[in-house]
């Protein structure tokens, strides 16, 4: 097996350019049978109905109701554009497709199995994953865990099932990393959450292959509120091994929009290593609001990778609180805003202990009137002695109409800390295009080549599985760039 | 007759800051310090500044009065509204080629005093300009500089208010077609010192700016440097540097914007905050909004740090004490902020040096 960069090199440009967009792969949304669809004003009754249907313990219902109260009190976030157009009473808050939970792909109805096959999920699962759970609308419809992980007592379950089977363990961590009152959409998420994944990795355990959760929104005017909770107990990885969780998202083309308000909470115990990769390729019909936060204990390492390709609007800022001495985090984001769409992505690193380190790398590409924004925070608290942080943001604008914003904030309350930030905005040079045109490379291909080169140094540092999937997803997007030229 | 009458009820409609709950924007300015002072009534006196000046702005001075602000509008913010609400007069001067020293009258008061000066640098002129502002009162000072077509200017603004009062500075510049400006703003601290610097650049203009702020004696400085490039082929090179001593706070931030009409422009924006006190805080927020893909380059950098252990070890091994090393660093970096000011460089550096001498008690670079 070659290095990630070799794999990228080996990828034929032609294949990347000629790949189909996610819209073409999943096609247009088609009607499908639903068991339950809850719409209208979000009320206490609706919350109680969702909780009852999931047979939840009282503490979870109480948490949901507290979240509802906060949701009603908190103002709409005013730092971002576009969310004011979301009518929260207009969409379905909970949708259960008419399908029995399956143990293998063959048990799924044809129309659904066909959708996953087109994305290539069963094949990926068979080849590289230790475990997989797939969420369709509001419910997990299939979860599979290989024997390798069962033997190590790793818990990998749909979130709803984990609440019932391991209530004490879930209660200890659920809602603790990402506060309910953080903002209006966090409160909304906690009130309505459904589906998602729960992972518990016991002490001193390694997972060699990644686990994945894949989310599909099947219809329009739906809300998806899946919750993922990942607990890596002390020393749960060491040496060169690590826990790697991949999150994928997709949706067919919808006539109207749908709304995604998911959440990921990570607890990284002492000396653990957690890699969390998101490969977001929603169709242009999705408004994507993501909430991601990790807590890293002593010498733990948390790495976020955010491949943010599709959607109408995306707002996501994976954050790590470095709570233990010597803990570290790395956040890599690649955002492509191709067309009149918004990518508002970034990262937060909160240094709350001595000798902590954070590295944030953001690469954004805007094209065809797209707006790509980096928004981030590095906060070093008093007492986080000798902390170090570096932020690097690079933006590439492919045409006159597109825009790139870089909005970093660095707050240092500790005199022994070192924090630095660098950002560049570059354009696609006419000279570069001319040079390639003179060698017979058409404009679309040339753009693809340049974008590929722009992100290559980031790809080098990513886990192999992520590179493989990310290059494919980016390739899907490049096919559109190719057609532009 | 003031043409900028403000209704106090209109002011109340404004918030101090519109963006409140953003994950990346916070109240670096402690607005409560202004609230405590703004409605206070009392006597206001003005003293002639010490020294020889070509122009003195204010009731004790010799500039002409103007009736319209050009680059600041009362409705742009609550701070601007209060500035105009408390403002008695606007002073204006036009400058041909030459070297000029300008000062404001020195207000002495426990109440909010607003001052306002407009400087017009004439077309095709070559102007070097030193503006001094000393105050013994809380309040706001607005300085508008219009660098007209084809002008060339070197500009140094020295802000030296009494530390115990909250103060605000509204500095606005317009650099018109083919004009170029080297400029520097230097400020000593106050209880809450907000320094808003905003420049608008037109076609083929050039702007090379340095902003230097000190915060000590538990003071708080919020230095905001915004550069808006609306003209084709404009070129900006802007940096802000803040030193935070003892338990003080230094915030250096701003936004560099290249609009769609600012195609083929170039910008470089650097902010640094250096932490020199055990309980000091340093915040930087260098933002960039690039609204066209047709830019030559746009870069920004920021850093917060203290004297590195390597430098400390090296210099201590050569017999320097920690305090001497810190003062060396501060003098060196501060004086460099005036290096680009051509024929007024030495005057600017001497002023900075005098202020630093007061902090460090003696000048070790002599």
Image (cartoon, rainbow, N blue to C red):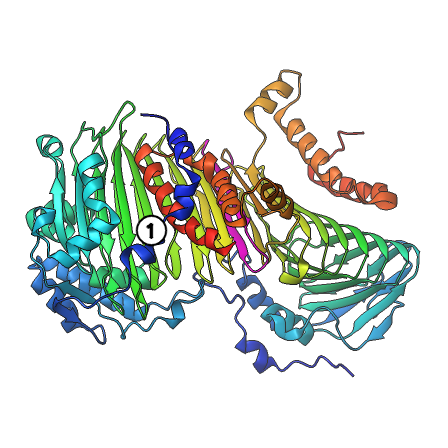
The extreme front residue here reads: A440
Task: Give the residue pinned by disc 1.
Answer: A280
Q: Nearer the viewer, residue A242 or A336?
A: A336
Rate crowding at label 1 as few (under 14), some (14 to 19) or many (20 or more) other CA atoms within 10 Å.
Answer: many
The residue positioned 18% from the left and 27% from the top of the image is A204
Check if residue A134 falls in the magenta segment: no
**Image position of B133 with respect to B7: above or below:** above
At which x and y percent is residue A285?
A: 34, 64
Determine whether, in the image, residue B17 is placed left or right of residue A44.
Answer: right
The residue positioned 56% from the left and 66% from the top of the image is B36
Q: Is residue A232 visible?
A: yes
Q: Which residues are magenta?
A: A386-415
At which x and y percent is residue B30?
A: 54, 59
At which x and y percent is residue B27?
A: 51, 58
- Secondary structure predominantly adopted by residues drawn in magenta: strand
Determine whether, in the image, residue B119 is placed left or right of residue B286.
Answer: right
The residue positioned 50% from the left and 53% from the top of the image is A366
Determine whether, in the image, residue B203 is placed left or right of residue B299.
Answer: right
Quadrant containing the N terminus of chain A is top left
Q: Is residue A349 visible?
A: no
């Amino acid at each position: 097996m070659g290095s990630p960069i070799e794999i990228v090199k080996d990828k034929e440009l032609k294949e990347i350019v000629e790949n189909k967009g996610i819209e073409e792969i999943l096609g247009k949304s088609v009607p499908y049978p639903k068991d339950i669809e809850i719409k209208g004003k979000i009320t206490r009754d609706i919350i109680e109905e969702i909780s009852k249907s999931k047979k939840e313990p009282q503490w979870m219902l109480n948490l949901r109701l507290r979240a509802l109260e906060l949701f009603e009190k908190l103002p709409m976030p005013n730092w971002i554009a576009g969310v004011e157009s979301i009518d929260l009473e207009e969409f379905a808050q909970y949708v259960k497709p008419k399908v029995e939970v399956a143990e293998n792909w063959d048990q799924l109805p044809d129309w659904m199995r066909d959708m996953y096959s087109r994305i290539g999920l069963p094949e990926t699962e068979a080849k590289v994953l230790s475990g997989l759970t797939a969420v369709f609308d509001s419910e997990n419809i299939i979860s599979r865990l290989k024997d390798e992980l069962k033997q190590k007592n790793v818990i990998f379950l749909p979130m709803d099932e984990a609440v019932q089977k391991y209530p004490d363990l879930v209660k200890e961590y659920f809602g603790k990393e990402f506060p309910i009152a953080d903002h209006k959409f966090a409160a909304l998420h906690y009130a309505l959450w459904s589906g998602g994944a729960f992972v518990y990795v016991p002490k001193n355990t390694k997972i060699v292959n990644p686990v994945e959760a894949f989310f599909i929104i099947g219809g329009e005017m739906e809300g998806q509120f899946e919750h993922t909770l990942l607990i890596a107990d002390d020393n749960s990885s060491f040496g060169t091994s690590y826990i790697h969780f991949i999150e994928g998202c997709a949706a067919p083309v919808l006539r109207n929009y749908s709304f995604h308000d998911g959440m990921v909470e990570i607890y990284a115990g002492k000396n653990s290593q957690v890699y969390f990769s998101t490969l977001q390729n929603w169709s242009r019909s999705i408004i994507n609001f993501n909430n991601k936060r990790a807590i890293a204990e002593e010498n733990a390492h948390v790495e976020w990778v955010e491949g943010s390709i599709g959607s109408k609007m995306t707002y996501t800022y994976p954050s790590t609180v470095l709570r233990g001495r010597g803990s570290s985090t790395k956040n890599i984001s690649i955002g492509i805003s191709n067309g009149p769409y918004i990518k508002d992505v970034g990262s937060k690193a909160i240094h709350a202990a001595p000798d902590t380190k954070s590295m944030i790398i953001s690469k954004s590409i805007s094209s065809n009137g797209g707006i790509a924004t980096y928004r981030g925070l590095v906060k070093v608290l008093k007492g986080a002695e000798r902390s170090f942080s570096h932020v690097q943001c690079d933006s590439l604008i492919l045409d006159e109409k597109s825009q790139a914003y870089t909005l970093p904030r660095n707050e240092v309350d500790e005199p022994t800390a070192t924090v630095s930030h660098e950002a560049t905005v570059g354009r696609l040079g006419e000279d570069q295009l001319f040079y390639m045109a003179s060698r017979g490379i058409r404009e679309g291909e040339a753009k693809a080549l340049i974008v590929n080169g722009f992100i290559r140094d980031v790809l080098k540092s990513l886990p192999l599985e992520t590179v493989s999937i990310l290059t494919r997803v980016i390739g899907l997007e490049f096919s559109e760039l190719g057609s532009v030229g | 007759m003031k043409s900028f009458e403000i209704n106090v009820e209109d002011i109340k409609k404004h918030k101090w800051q519109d963006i409140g709950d953003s994950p990346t924007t916070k109240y670096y300015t402690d607005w409560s310090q202004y609230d405590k002072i703004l409605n206070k009534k009392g006597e206001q006196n003005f003293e002639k500044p010490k020294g020889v000046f070509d122009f003195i702005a204010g009731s004790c001075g010799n500039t002409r009065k103007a009736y319209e602000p050009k680059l600041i509008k009362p409705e742009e913010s609550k701070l601007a509204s209060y500035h105009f609400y408390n403002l008695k007069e606007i002073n204006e001067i036009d400058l041909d080629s030459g070297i000029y020293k300008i000062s404001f009258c020195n207000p002495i008061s426990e109440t909010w005093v607003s001052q306002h000066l407009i400087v017009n640098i004439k077309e095709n002129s070559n102007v070097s300009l030193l503006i001094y502002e000393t105050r013994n009162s809380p309040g706001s000072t607005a300085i508008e500089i219009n660098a007209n077509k084809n002008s060339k200017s070197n500009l140094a603004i020295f802000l030296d208010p009494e530390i115990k009062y909250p103060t605000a500075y509204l500095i606005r510049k317009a650099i018109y077609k083919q004009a170029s400006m080297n400029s520097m703003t230097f400020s000593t601290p106050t209880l809450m010192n907000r320094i808003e610097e905003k420049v608008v650049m037109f076609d083929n203009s050039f702007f090379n700016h340095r902003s230097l702020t000190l915060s000590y004696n538990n003071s708080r400085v919020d230095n905001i440097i915004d550069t808006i490039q609306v003209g084709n082929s404009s070129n900006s090179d802007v940096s802000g540097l803040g030193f935070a001593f003892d338990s003080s706070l230094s915030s250096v931030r701003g936004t560099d914007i290249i609009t769609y009409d600012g195609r083929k422009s170039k910008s470089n924006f650097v902010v640094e905050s250096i932490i020199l006190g055990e309980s000091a805080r340093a915040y930087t927020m260098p933002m960039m909004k690039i609204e066209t893909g047709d830019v030559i380059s746009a870069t920004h950098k920021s850093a917060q740090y203290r004297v590195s252990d390597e430098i400390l070890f090296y210099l201590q091994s050569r017999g320097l004490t920690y305090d001497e090393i810190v003062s060396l660093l501060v003098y060196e970096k501060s004086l460099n902020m005036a290096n680009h000011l051509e024929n007024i460089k030495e005057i600017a550096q001497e002023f900075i040096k005098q202020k630093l001498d007061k902090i460090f008690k003696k000048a070790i670079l002599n």
